[in-house]
Image: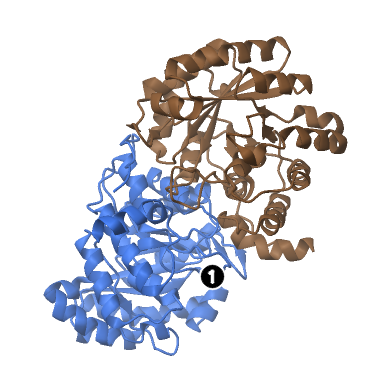
Chain colours: A blue, B brown
């Protein structure tokens, strides 16, 4: 592979972070190309082999809403054949009790629900009011916990909302607190439309801590729509957050913005973490090679700067 | 225009910064498309109208080395006709005494020289050794200062070098100090291949300050080759640096990397600064409209995330 960044740590940052890989679920659900189930299984296996953990595998959502993930059950079968028990440790999104039933039937150990910090997005994405969403999640979280599964709760539109504009920090903290009170183990605070900037990140994390939430229960989920994802991650590191969502190759894109860029690319995040000397346990070259391979499979160039800069060399090295 | 970031300042950052716009020179010298001189003059006029200042206009380099800027003299004539005295305030790059002669003949008030922090790049780009470059710059800086012009000194390859790998911080500080000792007013520290990360920025700025250099004499020049430019800018702000080089629409690209991305896009920088509540005096919508217009002129989509996200709406609004 090409150059690597010089390692120059910054005092006060976490010494180790967890990258929560969302490419196979959040990335692929926003890709327009139909992707064979076997390709998805291969993608997940490669990401695990690169050291990424957790890797969110799919969503047990009704195929009418997300046709890209209609093969969730088949994918789980393939993964169980290929990975054995490891397949049960891959988190899946469960939008409701029906989705949870499917996850529990398969004996999966980790599920995630997808909430909204705003009224409008709750109505548009969940077909529920802001308040009603918590009533919908309550039995999902309770039953998942009773079955011994961990529960991650996504909170979307934490910084801005395409219909409501700026989202008040107190409103996000309230939504997050309610999900934690239901029993969720971790919150993933999402900048779904990518408008947030570094100071907003700092203030949001501080507000959660002030509200009594342990910073270790927070994850940050940034989109690169306005180019801010990595600067916001740096702000998150300064605020002590140790879990970051990212998508291999920058897979996926926010349907509410015209930009080609969506999720923070795992590779760009890895480059920064490597430079800062922050441990993550992931092999950058293997992730780049995976993204180059997937680009070929789906016929679309990766928007990740690192993949573009290193990709050709890695593909050659992998050939 | 579309959404804007919520304003959430961070304590301890500068309240105001200067954006040093390099698009017309550093951006266009790396574009492959031949661009009419009138288009360049229009670009500069639009960038000035958006509030950007300074705007580096061109380079008095021999056309053999940078054919894209062979029209420097014609451009200056056009700019003087169109902008009057303002044209004399636009900095130009002068690679040597011959270039300086041309700038002084036109009565220009600001010139820039382009040095290297590494031996190999000095030889390849300047056809001089690392030590010999200072002998070449000495009469340029001295004569410029004697004529009442200010001198900016670019220091390239401050973080990594494609041939030498990591560049030691002491070596960069030595190069910068020698240029300041010759009489340069400002240093622009460039991550020419874009490999640097946030901690490296912090350490480099700290090393200059420790060597007795006033932080106000430093500018930072980041490339987005590995997606790090804006995170590195955030680190620079934390270190107290108040001048940042950027290129409208992310114009230009580093010839030493395969990535489509080169200079930090002015628009992506403005988005972060707006979110942080840091004053800059620039109208984001006008810069986006300019980049959309230029994309049409040169037939190439802007790599700036902000331009991609807001561009369509702005183009419509500007029509």
Location of the C terminus of chain A by quadrant is: bottom left
User: Dot 1 surroundings within 10 Å: few (below 14), some, or many (20 or more)?
Assistant: many
* Residue B4 seen in the current view: yes
Nearest the viewer among A99 and B291 is: B291
Residue B266 on image: x %, y %: 61, 45
Q: Secondary structure at mark 1?
A: loop
Residue B192 on image: x %, y %: 47, 36
Pointer 1 residue: A118
Nearest the viewer among B199 and A312 is: A312
Q: Quadrant of residue B145?
A: top right
Q: Chain of mark 1?
A: A
Q: Residue furthest front?
A: B64
Query: Residue at the spot x=40%, y=41% of the render?
Result: B195
Question: On screen, B252 above or below A221?
Answer: above
Question: On screen, B286 above or below B79?
Answer: below
Question: On screen, A106 above or below A234?
Answer: below
Residue B48 on image: x %, y %: 76, 40
Residue A179 on image: x %, y %: 38, 69
Q: Residue furthest left?
A: A84
* Residue A214 seen in the current view: no
Question: On screen, A29 above or below B269?
Answer: below
Nearest the viewer among B117 and B70 is: B70
On the picture, is B49 further left or further right than B8? right
On the picture, is B177 further left or further right than A61? right
Q: How many marks?
A: 1
Q: Quadrant of residue B303?
A: bottom right
């Amino acid at each position: 592979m090409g150059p690597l960044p010089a390692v120059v740590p910054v005092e006060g940052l976490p010494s180790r972070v967890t990258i929560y890989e969302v490419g196979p679920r959040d990335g692929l659900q926003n890709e327009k190309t139909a992707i064979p189930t076997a390709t998805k299984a291969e993608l997940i296996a490669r990401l695990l082999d690169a050291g990424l953990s957790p890797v969110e595998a799919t969503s047990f959502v009704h195929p009418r809403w997300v046709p890209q993930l209609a093969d969730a059950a088949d994918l789980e079968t393939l993964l169980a054949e290929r990975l054995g028990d490891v397949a049960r440790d891959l988190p899946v999104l469960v939008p409701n009790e029906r989705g949870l039933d499917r996850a529990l039937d398969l004996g999966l150990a980790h599920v995630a629900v997808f909430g909204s910090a705003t009224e409008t997005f709750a109505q548009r994405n969940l077909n529920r009011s802001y308040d009603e969403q918590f009533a919908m999640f309550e039995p999902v979280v309770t039953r998942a916990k009773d079955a011994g599964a961990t529960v991650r709760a996504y909170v979307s539109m934490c910084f801005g909302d395409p219909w409501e504009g700026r989202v008040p920090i107190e409103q996000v903290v309230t939504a997050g607190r309610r999900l934690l009170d239901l029993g969720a183990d971790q919150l993933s605070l999402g900048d779904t439309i990518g408008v947030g900037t570094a100071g907003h990140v700092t203030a949001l994390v501080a507000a959660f801590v002030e509200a009594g939430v342990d910073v270790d229960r927070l994850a940050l989920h940034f989109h690169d729509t306005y180019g801010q994802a990595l600067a916001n991650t740096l702000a998150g590191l300064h605020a002590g957050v140790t879990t970051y969502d990212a998508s291999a190759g920058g897979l996926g894109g926010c349907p509410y913005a015209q930009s080609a860029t969506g999720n923070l690319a795992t590779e760009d995040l890895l480059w920064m973490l490597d430079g800062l000397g922050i441990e993550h346990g992931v092999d950058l070259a293997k992730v780049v090679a995976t993204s180059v391979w997937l680009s070929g499979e789906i016929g679309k160039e990766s928007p990740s700067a690192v993949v573009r800069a290193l990709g050709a060399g890695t593909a050659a090295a992998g050939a």
